Image (spheres, rainbow, N blue to C red):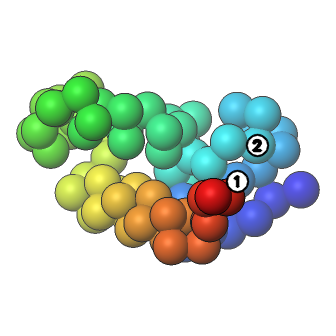
Amino acid sequence: MKAEINEYIVADSEICHGKPVFKGTRITVFVILEMLKEGASTDDILRAYPSLTKVHIKAALEFAANLAKQNRIPT
């Protein structure tokens, strides 16, 4: 099963166990988000993953923001 999350991100049960990846790659979105969390710059990420662009990084941040908006933390 394949779900298009946005123009740049897809989740496919046949790729990386269904984790969201950038279209046409096996680069998981969470890897990029983890790099950002650890302080990597956009340039660091683009050097590590030359197939990505700044637009991909922005798409990952938008994806994370949308998840945060949708989920409620039980209190």
First-in-chain label (2 vs 1): 1
Q: Are the residues tagged 2 and 1 within 8 Å (C-beta)?
A: yes
State the mark number for residue 66.
none
Amino acid identity at mark 1:
Ala
The image shows residue 43 at horizontal and vertical percentages of 10, 39
Which residue in the protein does label 2 denote? 18
* 33 vs 8: above or below: above
The image shows residue 74 at horizontal and vertical percentages of 67, 58
Residue 14 location, quadrant: top right
In percent of the image, x 60 and y 73: which residue is there? 70
* 25 vs 7: above or below: above
Identify the secondary structure beneath mark 1.
Answer: strand
Identify the secondary structure beneath mark 2.
Answer: helix
Residue 49 in sight: no
- Looking at the figure, which quarter contains the N terminus? bottom right
The mark tally for this picture is 2
- Looking at the figure, which quarter contains the C terminus? bottom right
State the mark number for residue 11.
1
In percent of the image, x 70 and y 32: which residue is there? 16
